[in-house]
Image (tube, helix red, strand yellow):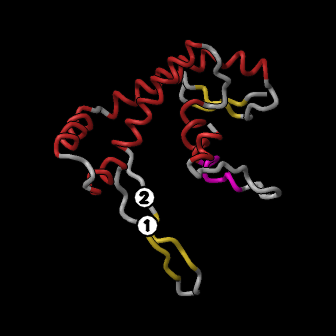
Amino acid sequence: MVDWAGERGIFFTRSRPYKKNDQATIESKNNHLVRRYAFHFRYDSSDERVLLNRLWKLVGDRLNYLTPTIKPVDYASTRSGRRRRVYDKPRTPFDRLLASRVLSPAQEAELTAYRDSLNPAHLAREIHELQIRLTLLAQEKTERMEPASIPSALPDVRKGIHVKVS
């Protein structure tokens, strides 16, 4: 892969020495998505992989079609002279895609019909069910393998509350 990319002028770099927050944006996304939906467990079986693949499709549908996000569009100054970010109005990634006008009318119609077929409550229930199944498969072995790396409050998805692990 590195040779192929190098032939095309694409070069991979690691974070800079002594700059521990170079990857902060990626890590915040990992924390937001991966750890929020799949927790801090170790998944290493084929059953878990199948469940994770189903989970990520549902999470992708929820985030891309139903969850509005804001995007930074500019900087402004406050009265005290400090710079602050200016954001656009919240829109879903799907709405932003439609506004970009890069899709053909057939693609727009197909994706709009798909979005209209999504039921947010049903999606939430399916995501929750998959989280319960993943937790039951992985929680015990993860705790047994790496007890020091697991956060002090693991989500107990069966009850919908956080429990303290000692």
Q: Which residue is mark 2?
A: 70
SS state under label 2: loop
* 68 lies left or right of 166: left
Image vertical order of residue 10 relative to residue 38, above or below: below
* 65 lies left or right of 23: left
- Where residue 106 appears, as percent x and y from the top left, is 17, 40
In front here: 52 or 164? Answer: 52
Task: Give, as a three-letter code, the residue at label 2.
Answer: Ile
- Where residue 96 appears, as percent x and y from the top left, is 33, 54
Quadrant of the frame with the N terminus: top right
- Residue at mark 2 to residue at mark 1: CA–CA distance: 6 Å
- In contact (CB < 8 Å): disc 2 and disc 1: yes
- Quadrant of the rendered image containing residue 126: top left
* 81 lies left or right of 19: left
Quadrant of the frame with the C terminus: top right
The magenta stretch spans which residues? 22-28
Q: Which residue is mark 1?
A: 87
At x 57%, y 30%, the residue is: 38
Image vertical order of residue 72 relative to residue 96, above or below: below
